[in-house]
Structures are given as structure tokens and as C-alpha cells.
Amino acid sequence: MEKQYTVEEAADYLGVTAQTIRNWDKSGKISCIRKAENNYRFFSIDDLDRIKSTVKPKMIRSSNQAMSKEVFELRSDRDLKRLISKLHRIVRDLDGRSSIIERFDELTKLFLVYNHLDGTLPSRGLDVDAFAEEIKQSYAEFLMQVSHTAPKVFEEIHLNNQCIFLILEYLGKFDLSNVSSDIKGLIYEEMIKDIFEKGDNQQFFTPKTVVSFMTNLLSTLTSGSICDPASGTGGFLINLVQENGPFNKFTALEIDQRLSWISGMNLEMHGCSNYESTCLSEGGTLGREADKFKESFDAVITNPPFGSDYSDLAGLKYFELGAGKSSRRRGVLFIERSLDLLKDQGYLAIVIDDGVLNHPSNEDVRNLVIKNTELLAVISLPITAFMPYASVEASILILRKSQKPKTVNTFYARAENVGKKTNGNEDYIYDNNGQEKLNNDLVAIQALWEAHLDGSEIKNSDFCYLSNIFETFQIDDNHSMRIDFAFHHYSRGLVRTALEKHSNKLVNLSEVCSEINEPLTPIKDLPEQTILYMGLANINSNSENYTQSHVPTNSIKSTVKRFEKGDVLFSKMRPNLRKCIVVDRGNEGYCSSECVVLRPNRKLIDGRLLSTILRSDFFYGQIVHLITGIGRPRVSVKDLRTIKIPIPSTDTSTALLKSHAKNMKAVEKLKMKSMEALKESEELQQNTTNELVTQLLQ
């Protein structure tokens, strides 16, 4: 249905007052449509356009009256949001047939010309139409001055004259002529943010915390020229410009014409004078057009569109990783292309999904990396990093291109939080003084990275460690070369020593228990029933505790597995959570298919002892490098069967379990005390508040 305009919107469009519109409606000069539910007037665009030609142009009386610069100041992000929101509403209301992307295009043009004129707008003695024509002419002059050619859609301003006038009239309320380029850039960023969160070519924009982290790491290593071969709106390059870092030439390459223009204009808005933004429409940076940029840059930084395939047979043959294949993931090819763009000894900072780092099908990618680079850093990102637009486990790689790579200690780190909630909003926490700060592990990782560069000792932890990857490869000849965080985890070395020292006391897991695999689909196999069920949420992490729920089978869509009392349930999905329990209470029932059901041979091992061993560092150290998968990492049942565990004698087992039970009681006591203390503190806080009010009332 075509948009219908309110009295106020019609008045804005025609450049008259709302009362004039009402008078015209009464006299029959314009026809309105009355809404049955409230009798409000609405007008069609056709009627408005018909009468527009008869309306006398609005005169701009003086700069002080019509283009005042004394109303608003931009003091906060909220002010920026209000400014952009108002501009979008003006265009929407006066150009109702435009899409949100078209509104963005037109606002970009007007903001650029406003910036070009330093806020000095034509005003005195001009009517709306003459004013708009001068603005269009100024925009044409601006296009002649910028360093790259505007796409056709950006060559002219397409808004009607009344809209042009009202937009710049509103912008004129903000004196931007003397503010820094940062403010102008922030305004432009705010326009971009809500429009281009995800595009047709699988672009999704990198969180600011990740952008800042990557640019800071790269700035500690090199200087000179830098390129983003999948620039999007230019976020990485903009951040480097804002930080006044060591780079002096900025190149943005993009497959999308609009985004290429936006990258260039974003750099322009941020005061960058030495930049190039190029649209490579035939395949983007992966196409032949990009060959002219080979070996041109001191550094490359990018978050490529790794979630889609490149299937151009003619283009694939030019890649070592694409030759002979019908398609290849774009992220894979971007690694090779990014290295092509670098000079020898140049540096690459790239975001890539963990499947490239650990999956057997991508071993050729890892071989190419090891053969042509020094692997300086691998920083694992949380699965929430790109939510809500993508749910993927990814890592940041820092590489140095080299014709003769040296052996280096790779800096490994893992971030659990990057300052973002799953809905994309900022994730804040509060320190002991109540000060707000982002929940962002990358700040601490950057500090460790800088300490590493300074030669300080880095203490191994689950958070960060150093590894000579070639030593790990020699140790583990049974698995394909991997370079992910888990594969080189320092705990593997510790466990390996224990395995060698106590090999005579160890057996394979499969020797002491059987895997019970009795799957069924409740909604089909047990219709209209209620079953005793345990999902992964029913099992506490790194604990003996669990709950069982009575669940209607019609509500369980997936497959489940049957278990009996005495069985051990081990979660093969996200095993780092160490969800493993023995069913020593309750009745037999069904569990999630993500659980491995193990039935201990009670002559060899007690179920509680087995579940405790499977939650230990000794066990996890053996499986950490076997965990694979994107989004929902898992360890395979095949690998679990070969993991070594110790088997004590019956007497030793009894004594150990008795001691363990005593310690677990102490653990529960401490938990109860902490809960009681927390409850007591909450009551004291409330009583203190109530007492203050009581005293005020006395």
C-alpha cells in the first residue's frame, strides 16, 4: 500500500503550515482521506505532487533566521543518534517512495556537501528551489575534488528541493565548521551503523573492540602502507587513522560499489588525506583486477567474508588453494590473496573461522601458512563475537610473510568476552568502585602481547600461553597439522609427561566401560508420554550435581539416548565445560544425544571414580587438541575410546572415593556459606536503605 501523509508531513513536503493544509482541505483545494477509526486526515503523494507546482516557493529570509547555528551542540553519542534519526525522518517523510538504503545514499551526499562547504550555506534572497540548485552545484564541485570516481548512484542528488532545504536547515542548527574531523566521522559512522550491518556479499561488521585490538597489535609490529582487501565501510582503516598510528597510506578494496564509495568517504570524513578506495567488481579482491596490488603493502588487516563459497572456475585456477577445485571458501582464498598483497616481511592480521585452523579438509591452507609465514599470534574469539549476525568460532591470526620463515614462539590467547552481548548490545561490568567498563578480555590480552614483545616471561594458563608449533607437530604425528588454540594447549605437555611416567598404570577408556547407544525419537517412538529426561542444562559444569525433569515426549523434537542407574554421562559437546556425572540417584531415563552414555565395568572401576577422572585436567589435557567444530565444538566418541585413565586397586579406589567424598562435602559447605553470606549482605543492604528512610521520617 502506498504511504499516506499526515497533515504535518504534507505541510513539510509543501513548505507550508499545517493550518494552511487544513484550510485547503476545507476549501477543496486538496483532497484528504479520513481514517474511519479516528477521523484523522491523510493525503496521497499524487495529490501533494499535483498541488506542489501551484505553491509559491518558500523564501529563505536570512542566515540568522533560517540557518541558525545556535540551537544544538553534539555532546554525546545520544546527540549523534538524535541528529541522524531526525535526518532520516525528514527524508522518509518528504520522499516516501525511497528505501532505507536510498535514504542513506542521499543523506551521505548532503552531509558530504555540507562538510565541503564548511557549514557555510547559501541563504539570503534565495527561494527553496534556487537554494537546492546551489547545493547540487556545490556537490558536483566536491566530486571533482575527491580522489576516486563516484558510482553512478552517487553522481547526483536525487532528493526533491524541499527535502534538500529541510535537511540542510536542520544540519545548520549544528555548527560543525570548527569541530574536528573525528566528530564529522562519528556522524558518518552513526549513519552507516544501522544501515550496513550485513550485506549481500556476506559482510558483517567487526565489533569495535576487536577492530581496536587488531589495529593495536598490528601497530606494534610495523608501519608504512596498509590495505584492507574486504574493507566494508572501512572500519579497520578508520580506526588506524583515528589512533594516529604508524601508517601513512591507506588502501580499501571492495567488491561492493556502494561500500567502496562509503569506505573512501569515511576516510575523507575522518581527515585522511592519503587514501585509495577501489571497487573491484569482478570477483572483488579474489578476482584478477586485484593483481595490480600484489606485493604492494607493508601490512594487510581484514575480516573477510569467510561464510560463503567462491565458485568462479576461471578465477580458482590462479590460487594454489583453489586450483583443481570447483569451489573454495572465500576466507581460505583471502588468506592466500592477503599474503600475495604483502611485501616480503609484511604483516597480516586476519579474522578466520576455526575450521580453517583445525579441520582436516583445510590442511593445505595450514601448510601454505607454515610454508610462507611466521605464525606470530593466534587469538581465539568467543562464539558471541559476531552475534547476532553470525554464530561462529573464529580466531585472529597475526602472520609475518617470509620467503625463509624462522621458527618462532607463537603467542596463543583466548578471549571469553569482547564487550558484546549476544544481541549485539555493549556488555558492561562494574569494578569495585562502581565504575562502568566493557566486559572485554582483549584489553588484558593486548597487555600480555606487549609484554611478550618486550621479552617478559608469559606464564602459561588457560587464558594465554606460548608454543613452538613445530615441536607439537613432532609430538603428535597421528593427527593432521593444526594451529588452533586447543591443539597447542600447554596442558598437553604436562599430561604427556604423566603418560610417559605412569604408562604401566594406564588403560584405554574403552577397556573399563562400554558405550551404550540406544537412541530413539520420543515424539515418534514414545508418543503422548512423559519421560524422565536430562539435557545438558540439567548437568552442572565440573560438578557431581545434576537434576532430572519429567518432560512430555511431544516437546522433544531431537533424538535422545536411554541410560540406566549407575551409568556415566559425558557431554561430548563443549567438553571444556567438563559436564560429566554418574547417575547414582533417581531412575533410568533418557538424556541428550550430545551425551556419551558409558556403562562402567564395576569389577574394574567405580562409576563415581570414573566420572571424577573424566572431569580432571589429566583427562582434559588428552582431549583438548581433539576438539573440533565451529559453533558447537565436540570431541568424537572414537577419540574418547583411546584416552588413557589410571585404574587403582579396589582398596585404593575405596580410600580415594572416601577422601573425595569428604572433600566434596567441604566444597558444599563452602558454597552454602557463600550463599548465606550473600543473602545476609543483601538483607543488610535493604535494611540499611529502609533505616535511612525511617530516620528521615522521624
Image (cartoon, rainbow, N blue to C red):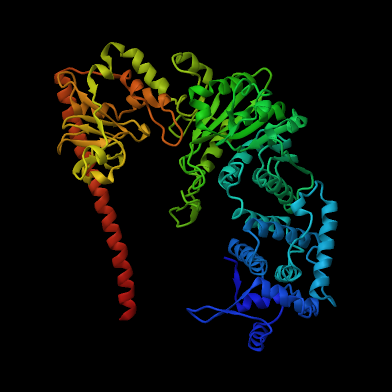
- 539 w.r.t. 432: above or below: above
Relative image position of residue 663 (x, y in whole percent): 21, 35
Label total for image:
0
**Quarter that holds the N terminus:** bottom right
- Say which quarter of the image contains residue 348: top right
Q: Name the residue rendered at 37%, 22% in the picture.
A: 622
- The percent coordinates of residue 404 (x first, y second) are 67, 17
Q: Quadrant of residue 11?
A: bottom right
Quadrant showing the C terminus: bottom left
Of 417 and 525, which appears nearest the observer? Answer: 525
Query: Which is more toward the observer, 454 or 521?
Result: 521
Between 99 and 42, which is closer to the camera in this rendering? 42
Q: Residue 407: image x %, image y %?
A: 59, 19
Q: Where 74 falls versus 59 (above or below)?
A: above
Residue 670: x and y in percent read 24, 44
**Which residue is more in the foreground, 565 or 53?**
53
From this view, report whether residue 237 is shown above or below residue 495: below
* Residue 454 in view: no
User: Which quadrant of the figure has residue 245?
Assistant: top right
Which residue does the image show at 51% across and 41% down from the upper left?
A: 444
Q: Residue furthest top?
A: 504
Q: Taking the image as drawn, is residue 542 in sight?
A: yes
Which residue is found at the position 15% from the left and 24% from the top?
654
